[in-house]
Amino acid sequence: MFESISRLFGPSARNATQPPESRLAVAALLVHLASVDGALNAIETRAIADALAAHYGLGEAEVKSLLAEARRRDGEAVDFYQFTARLSQLDEAEKIGIIAMMWQVVFADDTNHELEDNMVWRVAELIGVSARQRTVLRKKARRATTPPDRTLEDDDT
């Protein structure tokens, strides 16, 4: 009897191998973000994989599977709502972590294209991260990628 109840309320075998929907939503947004400027490169792809692995504690195979599904979902999406609706329900710390990952991907190739900046702004607004917090995270991510011989004033885009 206990086994029957466990199967009813527990995760199914199919769902046990599927990534949680919030992880998939984040991955899809990161994939879209990396390609929004028209050029998804190996550096950005690695940044996405590293961000997902570090944030969610995933192994290489899990990240590879998650990214494959994220690319598929991003290709089918008509807007961000299907992704951000799930993420807006998360706690504040998780939302901030998502925006931090987005900035990590933006600055992975040492540039900040205006379309990338706009997408992070829109996603932050949709999931409930304040403009102040978004800006703090942006500056922190930029500092992490600024070479020692350059200052933030050199490239304050």
Image (cartoon, helix red, strand yellow):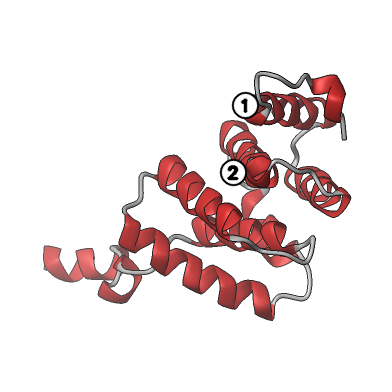
Which residue is drawn at the image coordinates 36% and 44% (left, top)? Answer: 57
Element marked by disc 2? loop
- Cα–Cα span, label 2 and label 1: 26 Å
Q: Which mark is residue 90?
A: 2
Which residue is drawn at the image coordinates 79% and 51% (left, top)? Answer: 116
Would residue 62 be found to the left or right of residue 119 on screen? Answer: left
User: 72 or 140: which is nearer to us?
Assistant: 140
Element marked by disc 1? helix
**Which quadrant does the C terminus fall into?**
top right
Pick out the residue farthest to the front: 149
Circle 1: residue type: Ala
| Residue 30 figure quarter | bottom right
User: 130 or 68: which is nearer to us?
Assistant: 68
Residue placed under numbered mark 1 in the picture: 144
**Which quadrant does the N terminus fall into?**
bottom left
Which residue is drawn at the image coordinates 80% and 22% (left, top)? Answer: 152
Q: Give the percent coordinates (x, y) of residue 129.
A: 74, 36
Q: Give the percent coordinates (x, y) of residue 66.
A: 45, 65
Q: Is residue 91 above or below residue 12?
A: above
Q: Give the percent coordinates (x, y) of residue 45.
A: 55, 58
Q: Give the percent coordinates (x, y) of residue 148.
A: 65, 19
Would residue 58 be found to the left or right of residue 110 on screen? Answer: left
| Residue 56 figure quarter | top left
Circle 2: residue type: Leu
